[in-house]
């Protein structure tokens, strides 16, 4: 049985099937080539921006 996510609204119930890996990858492929070639994602920096904090690692 596939994993399911249940989202409950005020007057309705909706069940969505959890997407398979190949579906997720297909959605991501449409963004291929949209970022500069030298772009590097820094997850620590992203969390700092999101939380408004600064983390110093040594």
Image (cartoon, helix red, strand yellow):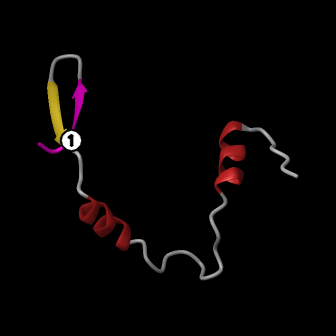
Question: Which of 44 and 32 lies nearest the eye of the viewer?
Answer: 44
Badge 1 crowding class, 10 Å Cα cut-off, few under 14, some 14 to 19, many 20 or more, is: few
The residue positioned farthest toward the left in the image shown: 1
Magenta extent: 1-8
* Disc 1 element: loop
Please tell me which residue is depicted at 47% across the width and 80% down the height of the picture: 33
Q: Is residue 9 above or below residue 51?
A: above
On the rendered image, what quadrant is the N terminus found in? top left
Q: Is residue 46 above or below residue 27?
A: above
Q: Is residue 20 above or below residue 14?
A: below
The residue positioned farthest toward the right in the image shown: 58
Residue 38 occupies which quadrant of the picture?
Answer: bottom right
Disc 1: which residue: 3
Question: Where in the figure is residue 26, as x and y percent of width and height?
Answer: 29, 69
Please tell me which residue is depicted at 70% across the width and 46% down the height of the picture: 49
Q: Is residue 56 left or right of residue 47?
A: right
Q: Is residue 30 left or right of residue 39?
A: left
Question: Which of 13 and 17 lies nearest the eye of the viewer?
Answer: 17
Please tell me which residue is depicted at 81% across the width and 42% down the height of the picture: 54
Secondary structure character of the magenta stretch overall: strand
Residue 8 occupies which quadrant of the picture?
Answer: top left
Residue 14 occupies which quadrant of the picture?
Answer: top left
């Amino acid at each position: 049985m596939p994993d399911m996510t249940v989202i409950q609204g005020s007057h309705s119930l909706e069940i969505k099937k959890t997407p398979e890996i190949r579906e997720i990858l297909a959605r991501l492929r449409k963004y291929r080539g949209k970022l500069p070639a030298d772009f590097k994602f820094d997850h620590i920096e992203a969390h700092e921006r999101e939380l408004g904090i600064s983390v110093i690692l040594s």
